[in-house]
Image (cartoon, grey):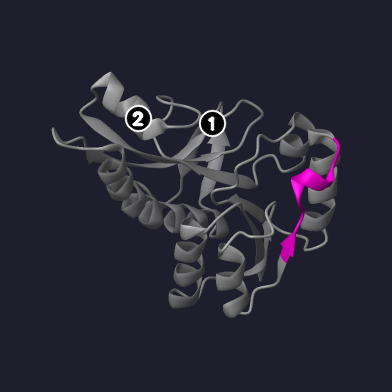
Amino acid sequence: MRRIVILISGRGSNMRAIIRAAQNEEWPARIAAVISNKADASGLAYAAEHGIPTLVVANKDYPSREAFDAALQSKIDSFAPDLVVLAGFMRVLTTPFVAHYADRMLNIHPSLLPSFVGLATHRQALAAGVKLHGATVHFVTAELDHGPIVAQAAVPVLADDTEESLAARVLEQEHIIYPRAIRCFLDGRLSVHDGVVRIGPDASEAQAG
């Protein structure tokens, strides 16, 4: 059975969606651990309630990004994961850390990449006047919010949208496409060729929007 480690920094709403999907769909994998860089992350309690081991590796306890990433990597590797999932993990990761998990670390970003990298993506979308916004699941690379795209979901931007209303509709789609993308990885359906993800047979459900 394959093993997943999830990293969070807060309430972990995507983590919750992943846990629900893994249980309801009886994935051929188990979530080996949920790790947070913040001790007060409310998602830790949810994971523990579902019998998942939890750990805190607090970045404030380390003198540098490199030292923190080395400690985090050691904890992750103790669970021997096949896949590392970033679910609202609010840290910029160092190049050696990302390289260590090359092609086996996924992230979800609240925009239709390559548009609107970084923070405040919904504000960026409204300011740009785009008519479609959304979310992207991608493999993590050293370049922030880049990497081969696995799945995307689009939502319309409405005339009366606020950051909050737009964010809420995007989050609904995140909770759909992230578990589906992870399931495709677990089933061995994902491959990367020249920076482009190819999805094998019967994996069309990972594409939305």
Give whichever of discs 1 and 2 has the lower sequence position: 2
Residue closest to the far left: 159
Q: Which quadrant would residue 188 be assigned to in this image?
A: bottom right
Q: Is residue 147 visible?
A: yes
> Measured from the top left, where is residue 163 in percent x and y?
30, 38
Residue beneath disc 1: 145
Q: In terms of depth relative to the viewer, which is nearer, 85 or 125?
A: 125
For numbered disc 2, what is the local secondary structure?
A: helix
Q: Using the image, tell me which numbered label, if any, was put on residue 123.
A: 2
- Height in image: 2 above or below 36? below
What segment is highlighted magenta in the picture? 55-63
What residue is shown at x 36% (from left), y 50% (from top)?
A: 171
Quadrant holding the N terminus: bottom right
Q: Residues within 10 Å of mark 2 (few under 14, many from 20)?
A: some
Q: Give the mark toward the camera: 1 or 2.
A: 2
Q: Position of residue 143 (x, y in %)?
A: 62, 25
Residue 57 within the segment the image draws in magenta:
yes
| 67 horizontally vs 48: left or right | right
For residue 116, what is the image quadrant? top left
Q: Residue at coordinates 66% horizontally, 66% vertically from top-left?
A: 2
On the rendered structure, is 151 left or right of 132?
right
Is residue 203 shown to the viewer in this render? no
Question: Residues under labels 1 and 2: Cα distance?
Answer: 17 Å
Q: What secondary structure is found at the residue carrying circle 1? A: loop
Residue at x 51%, y 52% (from the top left corner): 189
Q: Are marks 1 and 2 in contact (CB under 8 Å)?
A: no
